[in-house]
Image (cartoon, grey):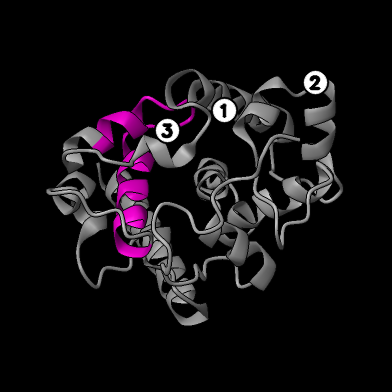
Amino acid sequence: MSAPGSPCGTICGVPTIRITQDDAADDLLSRDPLALLLGMLFDQQFPMERAFAGPRLLAERMGLDPASDGLSAADLADADPDALAAWFAGPPAVHRYPGSMAARTRALCRLLVDRYDGRAEKLWGGVPDGATLLRRIGELPGFGAQKAKILVALLGKQYGVTPPGWREAAGSYGEEGSRRSVADITGPESLAEVRAAKQEAKKAARAASAAR
């Protein structure tokens, strides 16, 4: 395998991420920028905590030690498609749709290799402003407008990535004290609050649609 990611992400001393409620998975998210990026990729039609625990499962199946090693974009981009699909399939599966998510992972990692030397942290390292960060993230495979804003908020609120205008770029997800997304999860209580807020938002959307 290629050399693992930086042991402390872009900024040493960032608080430990507490999204998955699993110490090993959260530790990997905290110190490996690629793991955090992949967790955000997996957060689609899948429980948030399981999506962000996916990078740990993937690392284990690649023969890495999640307690000390980091994921490699180059290894994932160059992985045999059948082997990668098998890693995603499990059991347990890394994602609800393991085949399509394996393909998206390869595409995302290939972009990181081609544009950012295979380093996820270079995606946001040295960006001049939040608008640039949002644009870069929006260019990633599997990242639509909403997901890009949520990642900007997650990086700003929990990863120490705070270029000028990052809250504005994140929109409502960047608001202080909000409970709208994974960017606001720091433990079991906030996880429950975010999940409840998401359910209320879906309920309101259904009601609005029915009233039309």
- Indicate the secondary structure of the residue bearing disc 3: loop
Residue drawn at point x = 84 percent, y = 27 percent: 83
Residue 154 in the image, given as x and y percentages of width and height: 36, 56
Separation of residues labelled 3 and 1 (CA atoms): 13 Å
Magenta residue check for 169: no
The magenta stretch spans residue 149: yes
Compare residues 51 and 162 and report the one nearer the observer: 162
Residue at 50% over, 44% down: 37
Could you say where residue 22 lies in the image, as x and y percent from the top left? Answer: 66, 71
The first of marks 3 and 2 along the sequence is: 2
Q: Which disc is residue 109 wearing?
A: 1
What residue type is disc 2 on?
Asp
Residues rendered magenta in the picture:
133-158
Give neighbour class at mark 1: few <14, some 14-19, many 20+ (Cα, 10 Å).
many
Sequence-wise first label, 3 or 1: 1
Which of the 4 image quadrants contains residue 88?
Answer: top right
Residue under circle 2? Answer: 80
Q: Is residue 89 visible?
A: yes
